[in-house]
Image (cartoon, rainbow, N blue to C red):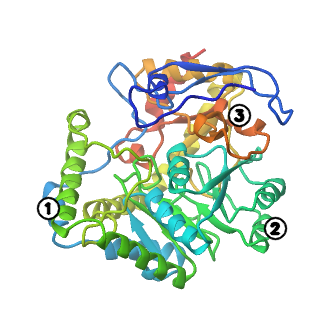
Amino acid sequence: MAPPINQNIFDKSGPRFKAQQGQKIIWNHNEDENGSDCLDSNIDLQNIRYPDCPVRMPLYPLAGHFSGKSAIRSFFYSKSDVLNNLICCVFGSSAQQVLLGESGTATLVYWLEWLQLQNGGRLSVALPSFFCEETALAIRDQGSHIVLLELSEDLQLSHASIDFAIQHGCNVLIWPNYFGYRLRNQNILRKARENSILVVFDEAHTFPPAQPCSYELPQEITLFSFGVNKPLAGISGGGMYFPDPVMASQINNFIESKRRSRRSTFMAVTDDTKNVVYTRLRWISPQFASLIRPKHIASSVPHISDTPFPAMNHYHSEVAVARWRLRRETMPAHLEYVAVLQSEVLKLWSTFSVSMLSPTCDVPAMFTIRAPSKIRYSLSEALREQGIQTAWHFYPLHRLTSFQDCPREAMPVSDQLASEVLTLPCQWAHTMLKMTPLYLLPQFANIS
């Protein structure tokens, strides 16, 4: 079995941080304890390639202008109601069924903490091994027991995976959509529900759905995000939708009780002000902002702001509303650009056996391909040298030391995905800023 990756995401002197500076880990070709062949490939732990030369094509450009006046104004009144209305239209719900926080992970952790109390102090969460490690660490540090599931080739969960979750007594199943919206198998969902498993749709990669796509309603409990690398291309923030208004009300009350017990209003407002100032600096000068970045607490469990405002920072809410509108206006042109990019990539990289992921119902928020593992790194390096950022998402959790004690299925597909997925710069923000695929495509033909 391949050795796990030694990992500590908050200690910059730790081995994982050093690995992220460009080291690799070799996965040897042998068998794991389940008798399944491990993949023979090189995995670069630095999952975003930051060019040494000037970045001509960033993965996630900051689109549009949001004035300092708007930042100051956001302290006195908020467009949170506008954001809530937009979110409610997506789910066909009331504002009381939506919980906003500083991140999707923050709201998820609080919900799991509340659920754990309802469940007598123990909670088991099933999720794919091909999953966001920071969110998984937060779930683990919150106290939940994690069970790792395998994906199918079309990035879905199978009946066998649900059976595995049932076998291990899971109370919660987190089912992500990857890089775009795909319909989930209703028979598999029914099996989970019949066995008293609460299903959470992780739509961080799809929210909000782009027209003409819309979510298949009624939606399960849903996790969403407004992060810079998500469809909305915002600054920060996220939340959850709850189809059960009673559950939503109980969770809101639970969070409010935790807020009141933590800090004074003055300290809460002061910290929130610092957060807005830092966000503005990051917007104007990322390099300077990185020098004064606030120190993180020594825990991977995020916190919902305890200011006497809505849980999501006002400034972030206004940015999310602005981004929502900009994205909606840009989508018709962006749809055309994505079609051009897909056609040209398949044509120019045909000799490399590059392929697209399984089809989505929407315009993919991230343009992601599968490149054979033997050429993915060199492909990324060639683009990096030309000032073009690329990324691959997620280290399989079963390869990380923090999750070695988690029950898991055999993971051949997750290993394969981890070695082949490559994301190229193609957000709606690129289209709005006239960073069209035509700017990127001429570089492709010279890569070998």
Q: Quadrant of residue 410?
A: top right
**Residue at the spot 55% in from the left edge and 42% down from the top edge:** 367
Which numbered disc flags the more N-terminal residue, 3 or 2?
2
Q: Residue 429 location, x and y as percent? A: 39, 47
Query: Mark 3 is on which residue type?
Result: Asp
Residue located beneath label 1 in the image: 72
Answer few, some or many: residues within 10 Å of disc 1's Cα (few below 14, many 20 plus, some between 14 and 19).
some
Residue at 53%, 85% in the rendered image: 246
Q: Residues within 10 Å of mark 3 (few under 14, many from 20)?
A: many
| Viewer-closest of 254 and 187 | 254
* Rendered-image quadrant of the C terminus: top right
Q: Earlier in the sequence, mark 1 or mark 2?
A: 1
Whichever of labels 1 and 3 marks the residue nearer the N terminus, that label is: 1
> Which residue in the structure is indicated by mark 3?
415
> Which residue has dot 2 on it?
187
Where disc 3 sits, the SS reads helix
Which of the 4 image quarters holds residue 398? top right
Q: Nearer the viewer, residue 301 or 100?
A: 301
Is residue 370 visible in the rendered image? The answer is no
Q: Residue at x 47, y 31 (%)?
A: 48
Q: Position of residue 1 (x, y in %)?
A: 75, 26
Cα distance in 3D space between marks 1 and 2: 50 Å
